[in-house]
Image (cartoon, rainbow, N blue to C red):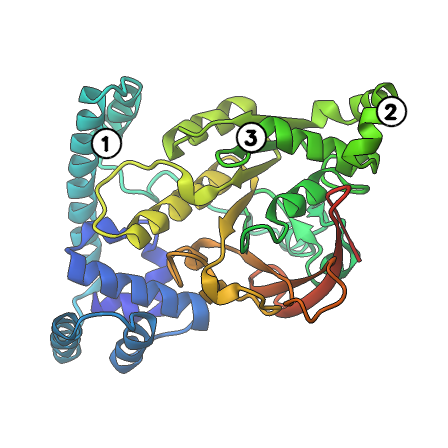
Amino acid sequence: MKLLLSKDFFDNNKTRVMRTMFPSELADLYDTIVDGHDKYDRNLTVGEVRELYRVNNPTATRAKRELLAEILDDISAYAPMGEDVAQDVLTKLWQQEVGRRIADMGLAMMEGTPEKIHEIKELIEKSENGFVPDDDIEPITTSVEELLEYEANENCWEFNIPTLAKAVRGGKGGEFMIGFARPEIGKTAFYVSLAMAPNGFCAQGANVHIITNEEPAKRTMLRAVMAYTGYSKEQIYMNRSHASEKFTEIAPNITMLDNVDASIEWLNKYCANKKPDILIIDQLDKLNVSGTFARTDEKLREIYLKFREICKRHDVFGIGISQASADAENKTNVTYAMMENSKTGKAAEADLIIGIGKSDITDNNDSRRYLTISKNKLTGFHGNIVCNLETATSRYTA
């Protein structure tokens, strides 16, 4: 655990280490270390981890805080093990994790999920070959030109809200964005507008897939028609043939599914088969995931971690839609600390986080929305962006 405080060791081994490898008290400590590296991008001290745990877990019991203090005192007192020994330990821990996963999937099969047999076979084959998560990863290019081209973000799917695009041009395959807000603020309109409004993802040629497990997909698809045509629902009723003809132009680029039983495992296979360019999940928190979790935030962290892995594995730009907590009510500055059920676990996995806020009734402009970028690994911009929501057409505009 002490070696994980080193930024270099953490970066080189984070694909090998999972919170499920640790007992619950160490798993909480691991979450804090991950959050610290994500925020500060440098080596951490034991004292810093102690303070980060305290501020990130204000409701922790006194007994739990005292236990973590004892663990940190022990870590501080012990000399770090050699990296060669640490690598062997990580390999053994991963093999134990494989055994636990096989047991969990075996139970899932007994409960009526027969497709788990394929995942069990794959895990067994990999463990027989001495597999650990990064053993079969090809090294990236050393071409300076290719690296500069990637960093320039030239091949990204661009955001079509001008004020947002100025701060963050867009996203590309392998990147993961979270959009969140309070109910009835405009979450669905936000992703529908990005995909379907003028100059949106679909107009750029992207193959956009949307999985809904909250609002009925047919209702969301109608909003997509509204965003693309610029017609309100009433205008579509009055001009059905014209709206239908116009929407036919873009329909091949949009796929929408209702799947209240969607799981991380199903989503991984779906991406392998359908190969979307952009994948939007509304609501990401409601995906099912294998494993046993003591708390909601543990389950959510696993969902978001696995979804990020899917984005990278299948070269997909992933957008997860989530709820904001009551702390965001009537706020114009909606940061990731206001995400429901997880202040840091979900946020740690994202490249870009956008909170959508709306002022209280004293704001005479009811259509005004505030996009708060509180995490941004893509361009580094942090702050608020003002835009407008045209509710009649589900379009966000500058």
- At x 22% / y 29%, what residue is drawn? 105
Which label was assigned to residue 239?
2
Compare residues 189 and 80 and report the one nearer the observer: 189
Name the amino acid, label 1: Asn
Q: Is residue 312 above or below residue 31?
A: above
Front-most of residues 166 and 368: 368
Residue at (23, 32) in percent of width and height: 129
Residue at numbered disc 1: 129
Residue 259: percent from the left, percent from the top? 47, 27
Q: CA distance from mark 2 to mark 3?
A: 23 Å
Relative to 367, 176 lies left or right? left
Amino acid type at circle 2 is Asn
Q: Is residue 63 visible?
A: yes
Residue placed under numbered mark 3 in the picture: 216
Is disc 3 surrounded by few (<14), some (14 to 19) or many (20+) residues within 10 Å? few
Residue 27 on image: x %, y %: 22, 58
Q: Position of residue 132 (x, y in %)?
A: 27, 42
Earlier residue among tags 2 and 3: 3
Asked whether 206 or 94 is in front, the reply is 206
Q: Are marks 2 and 3 in contact (CB under 8 Å)?
A: no
Crowd band around label 1 with a 10 angstrom C-alpha radius: few (<14), some (14–19), many (20+): few
Q: Is residue 232 left or right of residue 297?
A: right
Q: Measuring 63% from the left and 33% from the top, which residue is drawn there?
A: 220
